[in-house]
Image: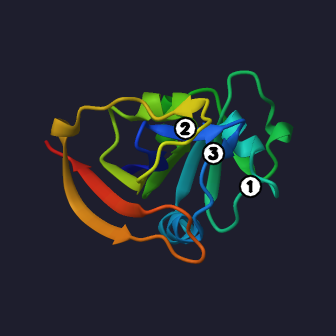
Amino acid sequence: MISIIVAIAENNAIGFENKLIYWLPNDLKRFKALTTGNTIIMGRKTFESFPKGALPNRRNVVLSRTGKPEDFPGADLYPNLEKALASCKGDVYIIGGASVYKQALDIADRLCLTYVYNTPAKADTFFPEFNKNEWKEVFREEHDIDEKHNQKYAFVDLERIN
């Protein structure tokens, strides 16, 4: 199964200056729980945004047409999404950035969204528009603001309607 996992604002914003817009500890826990033991596929900039490099306990795959394997320690390098997917077994999570999401949107089976009820003041990276009629909601868990979360948000899983 190919899943896209992303934290997304009301205006489809997902990042600013190669960083996540929102710091939501529960979103990070969910991300870890879903992706651990599986393959994660990302673009070069997403990999470079990780402070400690490759994420542990999962296969890290980076897409780059110009990068060299030594540029991405702990990760496998492929020139495009098609070749990366051909190398995968089991569940695959597409984790960003925007151009990789756009490439994967037509072939993804599931969207694992953290929908943030907010529009950020600054954003330079956005999730691509998608036809909501092609997806059905299969899971939703609402969360209010609390001592660790400054925004109201929901975990929402959508599956493609065949």
- Crowding around mark 2 (Cα neighbors within 10 Å: few <14, some 14 to 19, many 20+) is some
Q: Earlier in the sequence, mark 2 or mark 3?
A: 3
Q: How is the image coloured?
A: rainbow
Answer with the quarter of the image where residue 55 lies.
bottom right
Report crowding for label 3: few under 14, some 14 to 19, many 20 or more residues within 10 A (C-alpha): many
Q: Residue at x 31, y 58 (%)?
A: 157
Where disc 2 sits, the SS reads: helix
Residue 144 is situated, as x and y percent measured from the top left of the image, at 42, 71
In the rendered image, the vertical position of residue 73 relative to residue 132, given as above or below: below
Q: Nearer the viewer, mark 3 or mark 1?
A: 1
Q: Position of residue 89 (x, y in %)?
A: 46, 54
Would you say the residues marked 3 and 1 are in contact, meaning their CB atoms lie under 8 Å apart? no
Q: Is 139 or 75 nearer to us in this picture?
A: 139
The residue carrying mark 3 is 61
Q: Is residue 16 left or right of residue 33?
A: right
- Decide which of 4, 9 is in the foreground and name it: 9
Nearest to N terminus: mark 2 or mark 1: 1
Describe residue 53's horizontal placement relative to residue 5 as left or right: right
How many marks the image carries: the answer is: 3
- The reply to whether residue 111 is visible in this rendering is yes
Q: Earlier in the sequence, mark 3 or mark 1?
A: 1
* Disc 1: which residue: 54
Image mark for residue 84? 2
Q: Residue at x 16, y 37 (%)?
A: 133
Tell me the distance, in whole angstroms, between the alpha carbons under discs 2 and 3: 7 Å
Helix, strand or loop for disc 1: loop
* Residue 1 appears anywhere in the view: no
Q: In the image, what residue occupies the spot 52% across and 76% down?
A: 146
Where residue 18 sits, quadrant-wise, is: top right
Q: Are marks 2 and 3 in contact (CB under 8 Å)?
A: yes
Check disc 1 and give the amino acid type: Ala
Q: Amino acid at mark 3?
A: Val
